[in-house]
Image (cartoon, grey):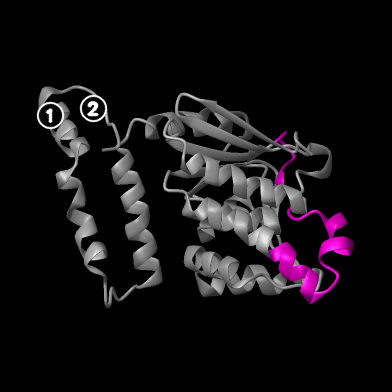
Amino acid sequence: MADDILLEKKDGVATVTLNRPTQRNAISYHGWLDLQRIFIDLEHDAGVKVAVLTGAGDAAFSSGADIKDFDLYRNSAAKARIYADAFEGAMNALEALSKPSICLIKGFCVGGGCELTLAADIRIAADNSKFGIPVAKLGILIGYGEMRRLVNLIGPGNAAYILYTGRMYDAADALRVGLINQAVPLAEIDAHVYKLANEMTKLAPLTQSRHKRIMQTVLANPGLKGLTPEEQALPLSNFDSEDFHEGRRAFIERRTPEFKGR
């Protein structure tokens, strides 16, 4: 169990790896709990600037929730509520992460695995990837949080198609509808994603975290009605930060800024 999810940190990048390749990286009940704990820990780790979430091997990012758990944890609505708390807790913790998150996707990205990627900020997929949320084939439903993320990302029409047909998307179709940000050849994807992640570690942490808060406010309140004083002040708050003054000086002095997140 301890090795089902791996965590590695290097040069400001944390890599979380779903490590059950013989089960196409299916996520168990305890795996969802572990993911929630890991994402909460990363939130409080000042040395981590970017999180990368991936699956072991080239065959699958994740095939979703482990079907073996259904008899024990999802055989009634009452038990399914307990399972959903773990399932949604992992996704909510990833979505709440104030640091940018990237999903590095290879192979199958299906069901709960696909839903998990919706909670990340950026999704980059190899050209061998396959996407789908075929819950209609199992007779179950996705939750409100997962539906919100799906509709926000690809719109109600595309969300209806992926759910009501149960069909799979290849990487090209996933890119076309906005389910992923980029499709990259399988042989190049690791280098591509880590080059991007390492570039992002050099950017201003306050800008990254506050952009995430502004984006979440806009998604939750598109009309921007009744913003709190704190929400109204947020877009100008960085002008009072040390990072803004460091960025301005570095630009004038034509050097790389050294941001401190203050």
Residue 75: quadrant of the picture? bottom right
Considering only vertical position in the picture, is 232 above or below 198?
Answer: below
Most extreme residue toward the left is 252
Residue 64 visible somewhere in the drawing: yes
Where does the image place residue 193, in percent across and percent down from the top left? 51, 34
Residue carrying label 2: 257
Dots 1 and 2: beta carbons under 8 Å? Answer: yes
Q: Quadrant of the C terminus?
A: top left
Type of residue at label 2? Pro
* Label of residue 128 in the image: none
Q: How many marks?
A: 2
Q: Residue at x 34, y 66 (%)?
A: 218
Type of residue at label 1? Arg
Report the front residue among 214 and 197.
214
Q: What SS does tag 1 mark?
A: helix
Q: What SS does tag 2 mark?
A: loop
Report the front residue among 211 and 126.
211
Q: Residue at x 57, y 30 (%)?
A: 190
Where does the image place residue 84, in percent across and percent down from the top left? 69, 65
What is the magenta range? 56-84
Q: Residue at x 52, y 57 (%)?
A: 176
Q: Is residue 224 magenta?
A: no
Residue carrying label 1: 249
Where does the image place residue 123, in percent across and percent down from the top left? 53, 47
